[in-house]
Structures are given as structure tokens and as C-alpha cells.
Amino acid sequence: MQDYPLPNNSFDLSGQVALVTGTTSGLGWRFARVLAAAGAKVAITGRRTERLEELKSVIEGDGGTCAAFTLDMTDTDAILNTVDATERALGTPTILVNNAGIPDAQRAHKMSNELIDAVFDTNLRGPFVLSCEVARRLIAAELPGRMVNISSIGGFNYGGNGAALYSITKSGIARMTECLAVEWARYNINVNGIAPGAFHSEMMDGMVSRMGDIAQHFPRKRICDPAQMDSTLLYLCSPSSEAVTGTVIKIDDGQGSR
């Protein structure tokens, strides 16, 4: 039997290469900084080049190693090229955080086909394509890996607030997590997810501006801070979660209906 330390709870990511999508604001910005602080070399991606450069400066100023790549998750070629660029700059990605996502913010019957395509491609198709490409490289290199897919509590409970397609895609992300975990368990690639409730981000701030102070409807009457997800992210990306795969952890502060 393997001799495990007591307790077996290392969050050390030294020697790991993490690819994080949607890092130009909110949750992704925080995720990238946390992984870098834990020792991973981090590839940050997003559509806003100036924000990527700002984040790169922050991570490097904190002593981390970082590479920045402009990425639109609706562009398949860009997804594949970003994995190539990450591998050249930092090494084979051993950690993938599928965080990029966009809201629909419209009633389903009022959505244009262009918006439908953008939400599906950004929130579900793009993450699937990216996950498969990273998995191919891990399998070829015979490396273990960790994937963390960012779902949403909205993928499990829909409040009828003009976000039906967003809810559908986030439910799809949760099911993608479960299925790919089974596909890749034999290759020691763990696939897990986080389903956040209301956390401060550009997307959440936009919702609050449209709907008012939604926090007053929550049991604790607050919107959470992304820092409150740090420990869960590190757990799922680190050696501590070696036997955990196919799990989606809800972090909703009691906000979601049960």
C-alpha cells in the first residue's frame, strides 16, 4: 500500500501547468491568481487582451509564472491553437479550468439565433472541445490531469428570471463533468466541477443592475466573494483529490432552493 502523509492534504501545485479560460474578470481572474500562488505555471485566456496583460502583470508581480493568450471560446481553431501555444510556452497543461461563460439575459422565445449559438458555443461546446484536446495530450504524454468545470447552481435550479439557456448549458456542463470523468478515469484524468451560487463578478453585477438587490432573497442576505471558492478549487486541482472524479460541488451559501 502507498504510504500517505498524515493528513494527506497537499495543495502544492509546483510543476503543474494550468490553463484557465475566462480570466479577464470575476471568478476566472481569481482562479488564475490562486493556482499561480499555489505554484502552478498558469496560461490565462480571454477575449480582452488589455485585461489579460493586466492580470499577467499581477501574477508575475506576485512571483508567479504566467502566459497570456487571447481566446474566443466560439472559435474552434483558436481553442486548439491556444493549447498548442500553452504547451510551447509552459508545457503540457495538466490542469484545466473551464470557466469561460456568457449569460443570455433574455426570455427564451425572444433570443436571436446568433445569441443562442454564442451561448451554446461559449458555455458548452467550447469547453467540450477544449477538454478533449487537453485530454488527448495528457493521454499521449501519459500524464495525470485535473479538470474543473465551472457549472452554476442555475444548472440545477431555475428561477425563471430570463436565463433559461444559460441554465441549460450549465446543466450540460455538470453532465459533461460526470461523463468525461468515466471516459478518462483509466488515464488518471480527474474531471470535477464547481456549481457556484451568486458570487461577485461582472456577470453577477449586470444581473443585479437589471433585477435589483437579489441578495435580500437569500438566507444570509449576501452575495459571496470569489475568495470563498479558493479552497474548493485547490482541492480539486491538487493531489488531495486523487480519488475524486465525476463530482460537482455546489457552493451556493444556502441560496439555491432545495
Image: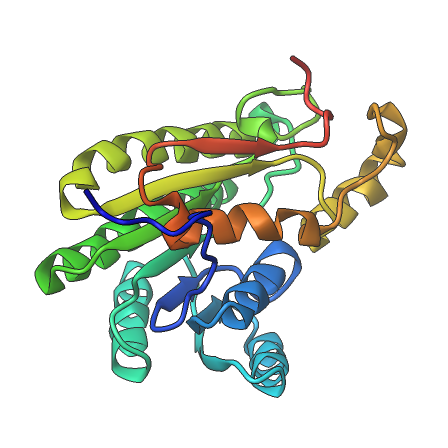
Q: Is residue 74 visible?
A: no
Q: Is residue 221 left or right of residue 170?
A: right
Image x and y of residue 238, in percent: 41, 54
Q: Position of residue 52 (x, y in %)?
A: 56, 76
The image quadrant that residue 178 belongs to is top left
Q: Is residue 171 above or below residue 199?
A: above
For the C terminus, the image quarter is top right
Name above or below for residue 225 compared with residue 182. below
Q: Nearer the viewer, residue 238 or 26?
A: 238
Query: 4 or 116: nearer the eye?
Result: 4
Measured as percent of width and height from the top left, residue 130 is found at: 30, 55
Question: Count of labels shown?
Answer: 0
Query: What residue appears at the point 9 percent right and 61 percent down from the top-left corner?
Result: 140
Please report the residue visible at 58 percent of the width from the left and 79 percent of the height from the top. 59
Q: Residue furthest top?
A: 258
Q: Is residue 251 left or right of residue 248?
A: right
In which quadrant is the N terminus drawn?
top left
Q: Is residue 109 above or below residue 63?
A: above
Q: Nearer the viewer, residue 188 or 176?
A: 188
Percent position of residue 91, x then y: 27, 76
The residue that appears at 35% across and 36% down in the rendered structure is 177
For residue 164, side relative to residue 98 (left or right)? right
Q: Is residue 94 left or right of residue 206?
A: left
Q: Residue at x 27, y 31 (%)?
A: 179
